[in-house]
Amino acid sequence: MGLKSKAVLSHGAEASLLIVDFYGGEAVLKIRKPKTYRNPVLDAKIRGSRTVLEAKLLSKACRAGVNVPALLAVSKKKSAILMEYVRGNTLAEMDDDSLRSYAADIGRFFGLLHANGIIHGDATLTNILLVKGSLFFIDFGLGEFSHGLEQRAVDLNLLFKILRALKPGIYDEFVLRFKNEYMQSIGREEGSKVFDRVEQIGLRGRYILERREKNAGTDFSYE
């Protein structure tokens, strides 16, 4: 895109994030990395398609009323997205009281995303920022468009699973506040279905864990 890099924000497995000069200000350039194990032509096609999809997800999330980095430019050929540089602290950096106080807002935004057929795909505490009192959702690189019940539930299950591990003391109250606003945004009937599926996913996980523990000391012989 012909932009001058000022600093490296991060190097992930899927993409690199660079801070670049943009008309005297700063923006973030996200470039998807080639996968050497794939055919180069196929790899370029996949990375280009994922880049365009992420840009569309950002654009639709913004129109749905969810705070996301402003989309500035997209290059399918270079598998790159130029977006607003949003500075803030992640939810993972918040203390318990602060995180609890934003539970309702987080639930409302997830409800808006899901009501508009947007699945975040990587709903972790590090992908939601607090910027001057407002929440911003970032990194839709694993997202998709879907109204599927399973996809919605997987989105929430990941968030709740991480929350339970990192913030067990506020988990129950957080989920209750989150759920109330999620229901308001997506509709009580749809919301109830999603939370029922979240519970089912949790039961599946516990069943698998129990089976693993049960089989851990079992010797199998094959004749």
Image (cartoon, rainbow, N blue to C red):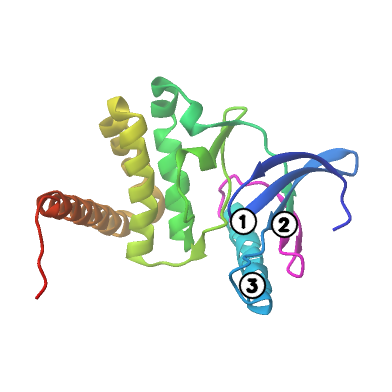
Residue position marked by numbered label 1 in the rendering: 58
Judged from the image, the secondary structure of the residue bearing numbered disc 1 is: helix
Where does the magenta region start and end?
A: 64-81
Q: Is residue 192 left or right of residue 6?
A: left
Of callouts 3 and 1, the N-terminal one: 3
**Res 177 visible:** no
- Label 2 Cα crowd, 10 Å radius (few <14 / some 14-19 / many 20+): many
* Structural distance between the alpha carbons of marks 3 and 2: 17 Å
Residue position marked by numbered label 3 in the rendering: 43
* Structural distance between the alpha carbons of marks 3 and 1: 23 Å
The three-letter amino acid code for the residue at tag 1 is Leu
The part of the image, by quadrant, that contains residue 55 is bottom right
The three-letter amino acid code for the residue at tag 3 is Asp
Q: Quadrant of the C terminus?
A: bottom left
Judged from the image, the secondary structure of the residue bearing numbered disc 2 is: strand
The mark lying in front, picked from 1 and 2, is: 2
Do callouts 1 and 2 mark residues in contact (Cβ within 8 Å)?
A: yes
Do callouts 3 and 1 mark residues in contact (Cβ within 8 Å)?
A: no
Q: Is residue 205 left or right of residue 89?
A: left
* Structural distance between the alpha carbons of marks 1 and 2: 11 Å
* 103 in magenta: no
- 154 or 70, nearer to the observer: 154
Q: Is residue 197 left or right of residue 88?
A: left
Of callouts 1 and 2, the N-terminal one: 1
Marker disc for residue 81: 2
Judged from the image, the secondary structure of the residue bearing numbered disc 3 is: helix
- Residue 188 rendering spot, x and y as whole percentages: 30, 54
Q: Is residue 14 above or below residue 75?
A: above
